[in-house]
Image (cartoon, rainbow, N blue to C red):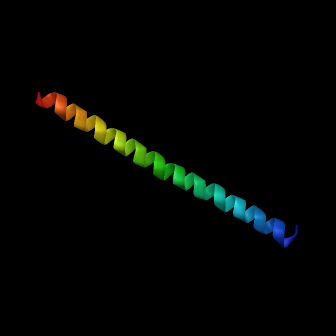
Amino acid sequence: MSHYNESKKARRIAAVIYLLIMAVIMGGTYLSEQKKAADKALQNSAAR
């Protein structure tokens, strides 16, 4: 393999890993926000 192809493969692997990490972070943030909203709604309904 040429150096260009090896570099290209390494960049693709790094990009996939980066996307997976970002997906985990964004998914965790989304779930956290959903839980906060659900907890707040539960508190509001319990306070009535």
Image quarter of residue 13: bottom right
**Residue 39, horizontal then vertical, whole percent:** 25, 37
Name the residue located 83 percent from the left edge and 65 percent from the top edge. Answer: 5
**Residue 25, horizontal then vertical, whole percent:** 47, 52
Judge whether 43 appears above or below 5 on screen. Answer: above
| Quarter of the rendering occupied by the N terminus | bottom right
Name the residue located 87 percent from the left edge and 70 percent from the top edge. Answer: 2
Q: Residue furthest bottom?
A: 3
Tally of numbered discs? 0
Judge whether 8 appears above or below 30 on screen. Answer: below
Q: Residue furthest left?
A: 48
Name the residue located 29 percent from the left edge and 38 percent from the top edge. Answer: 37
- Say left or right for 37 vs 30: left
Judge whether 40 appears above or below 21 on screen. Answer: above
- Say left or right for 28 vs 3: left
**Residue 44, horizontal then vertical, whole percent:** 17, 33
**Residue 18, horizontal then vertical, whole percent:** 59, 58
Name the residue located 47 percent from the left edge and 49 percent from the top edge. Answer: 26
Image quarter of residue 35: top left
| Quarter of the rendering occupied by the C terminus | top left
